[in-house]
Image (cartoon, rainbow, N blue to C red):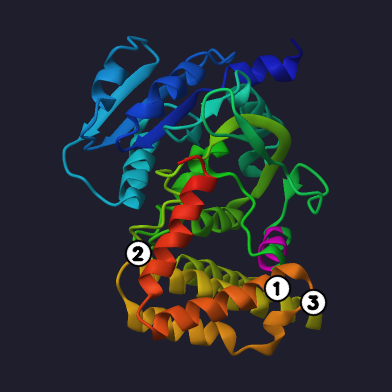
Amino acid sequence: MDEKGEASQKTRVTVCIPTYNSAAFLSETLRSLLSQDYPNYEIIVVDNASTDSTPEIVRTCKDPKLAYRRFDEFVPSVKNWNRALGLANESDGKYIAICHGDDVYEPDFISEEARYLDEHPEAGGVFSSAKTIARPGTQLGKLDRPPFFKSDEITAKELLIYSLNTAFFPLVSPTFMARKETLAKTGYFDITSKFAFDMDYYFRLFDWGSVGYLAKHLINYRVHPMQASVRFYDTTDTQAEFYQIVDREMKKLGLELTDAQKCRLEANRHWGWAIDAVSHAKLGDPKKALELTKKALVYPDALIDFPAPKFIFRVVLLSVFLSSQYVGLGKLFADIVYLYKAKKRGG
């Protein structure tokens, strides 16, 4: 092992797993994290009042590296993530990783990310690429670092441009590791956020240093119907939050868009309204659903790249959705959309 590698092995890492009712997958997650090739780390499971067998699963592990903190009061997931941050700040780890209780981590996850932070003292945090899985042994695809990013080190401007051009935030949340002092400066996750609190937080990280994005696939990111990032049954306005953050960062960075970028941003924003409209219909708010559907359809440049099949499909789908609402079938339409999404993700 080289000198840099030896130094990296000495850096204490605290891995926090905020979780709620993750019994179906938690055992596999813990096995993968307890099998890391990195010797100097601890794991803290932060249980948000689980009602399944999560406590028993943790207690059967009997590993000195593993600690279990159960909270009897159930809170929104963002508040449980803040509990994890609070416990991390009290730990003796120099680097903090926030992992998910349903993913499977490669044996070199901690060592690769700790090495990056050791070798890049200007970096406040680091992420990696991931493979996507459903059931054990079933690989769905990959979440690669986009070619748009030319190196392991990315800037806030690059991340913002990519996000607004694609309507997609590319950082893989459960691969996140950061310096404890950077987390302390960044503060806590925004508890007013329903969905995009991680995106908001990661943009704020750039105020205190650069951010790394490793091309290597260091985790197997599980996709399933009950996964927080794909389960929209208990929330609305997820896309509105996304674009609020995009608008804030554009103003903060003084980013000036080309005409083509402006057009694409507005097209994506209008499609976001359509997505939120379906969520409102699903959750029984037909008035808001109708308002957002009409709003999504009135922007002519939503046909950007016309006649590209994707945009023709969007307009047709929105028109059918609008018609369904006028005849009282908006919720049925939304239910079908959600059922399709659940089946697509292995439900």
**Quarter the N terminus occupies:** top right
Q: Are marks 1 and 2 in contact (CB under 8 Å)?
A: no
Residue 219 placement (x, y as % from top left): 60, 30
Between the C-alphas of marks 1 and 2, the distance is: 33 Å
Q: Are marks 1 and 3 in contact (CB under 8 Å)?
A: yes
Q: Amino acid at mark 3?
A: Pro
Image quadrant where residue 142 sits: top right
The answer to whether residue 130 of the structure is visible from this angle is no
Numbered badge on residue 311: 1
The answer to whether residue 76 of the structure is visible from this angle is yes
Q: Amino acid at mark 2?
A: Thr
Q: Which residue is mark 2?
A: 192
Residue at the far left: name it. Answer: 72
Numbered badge on residue 60: none
Residue 75 placement (x, y as % from top left): 24, 49
Could you classify mark 3 by the number of other residues whose Cα lies within 10 Å: few (under 14), some (14-19), or many (20 or more)? few
Q: Nearer the viewer, mark 1 or mark 2?
A: 1
Query: Can you say whether 225 is above or below 274 in the image?
Result: above
Could you classify mark 1 by the number of other residues whose Cα lies within 10 Å: few (under 14), some (14-19), or many (20 or more)? some
Q: Nearer the viewer, residue 2 or 327?
A: 327
Q: Amino acid at mark 1?
A: Phe
Q: Which residue is mark 3?
A: 307
Between the C-alphas of marks 3 and 2, the distance is: 39 Å
Q: What's the magenta region? A: 159-164
Residue 127 placement (x, y as % from top left): 62, 40
Q: Nearer the viewer, mark 3 or mark 2?
A: 3
Image quadrant where residue 189 sits: bottom left
- SS at mark 1? helix
- SS at mark 3? loop
